[in-house]
């Protein structure tokens, strides 16, 4: 139902996430949505699962004819206290991605909500390191539905230059324009849901958000 709403409003694609159950129980839903929408840009987030475990699953889905176009990980395992060439966990994730033969885009959570807290003084370092390990650096506010501090987003943008930056919490039609100059991708759910509804998309709010992003994107 929600995918149909998104498609009906002209969204370019969707991400699915398993908020209430383990990701193995989520896979039949992924297969079902792909079968119903074979040409749709379809991404997934296995909640609290890093790419180390997700990429083999995505590779297996791809091999069985269920392509997933993107993976958003809550935690890309960037260690701001180590050099870029000493990122043991992030490097293991990158190796898992290569070995999986999965061909989608990887958005990696960096200084992300509900993960290990990173001091603001290390935001720029974390962001710069992250660009070596993912297709788009993804950060957030302090919690789901909470807008990110504008200074944090500006710090990330300055640190990563022209590399893609995604923002994954607190985006609404009312505040999207204030982030648009620094962010390439909004990951949004609660900000376009009806009040008090954690699960369903409000078509009118999605339409408002899409109008804002398209208008901004068309401005030289």
Image (spheres, rainbow, N blue to C red):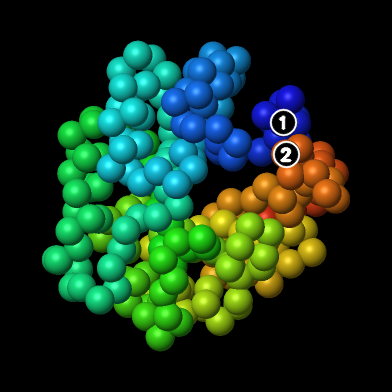
User: Where residue 83 sits in the image (x, y, percent)?
Assistant: 18, 73
Judge whether residue 19 can be spotted in this image: yes
Secondary structure under tag 1 reads helix
Nearer to us: label 2 or label 1: 2
Tag 2 and tag 1, C-beta contact below 8 Å: yes
Q: Residue furthest bottom?
A: 121
The image shows residue 210, relative to residue 27, as above or below, that is below
Q: Which residue is mark 1?
A: 2
Determine the residue positioned at 56% across, 27% down: 40
Determine the residue positioned at 28% across, 68% down: 79
Q: Quadrant of the N terminus?
A: top right
Answer with left or right where residue 135 lies relative to residue 185. left
Few, some or many C-alpha atoms within 10 Å of disc 1 (few <14, some 14-19, many ≥20)? few
Determine the residue positioned at 49% across, 43% down: 47
Determine the residue positioned at 45% across, 47% down: 48
Q: Which residue is mark 2?
A: 199
Q: Quadrant of residue 212?
A: bottom right
Q: Quadrant of residue 206?
A: top right
């Amino acid at each position: 139902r929600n995918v149909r709403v998104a498609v009906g409003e002209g969204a370019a694609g969707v991400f699915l996430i398993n908020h209430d159950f383990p990701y193995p129980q989520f896979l039949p839903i992924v297969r079902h949505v792909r079968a119903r929408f074979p040409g749709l840009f379809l991404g997934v987030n296995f909640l609290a699962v890093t790419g180390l475990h997700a990429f083999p699953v995505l590779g297996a889905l791809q091999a069985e004819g269920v392509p997933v176009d993107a993976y958003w990980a809550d935690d890309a395992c960037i260690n701001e206290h180590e050099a870029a060439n000493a990122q043991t966990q992030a490097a293991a994730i990158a190796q898992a991605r290569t070995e999986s033969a999965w061909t989608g885009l990887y958005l990696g959570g960096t200084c992300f909500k509900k993960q290990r807290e990173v001091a603001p003084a290390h935001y720029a370092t974390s962001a710069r390191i992250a660009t070596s390990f993912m297709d788009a650096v993804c950060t957030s506010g302090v919690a789901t539905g909470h807008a990110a501090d504008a200074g944090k987003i500006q710090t990330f943008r300055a640190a990563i230059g022209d590399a893609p930056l995604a923002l994954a919490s607190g985006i609404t039609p009312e505040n999207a324009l204030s982030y648009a100059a620094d962010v390439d991708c909004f990951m949004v759910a609660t900000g376009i849901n009806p009040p008090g509804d954690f699960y369903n998309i409000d078509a009118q709010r999605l339409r408002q958000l899409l109008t804002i992003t398209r208008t901004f994107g068309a401005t030289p």
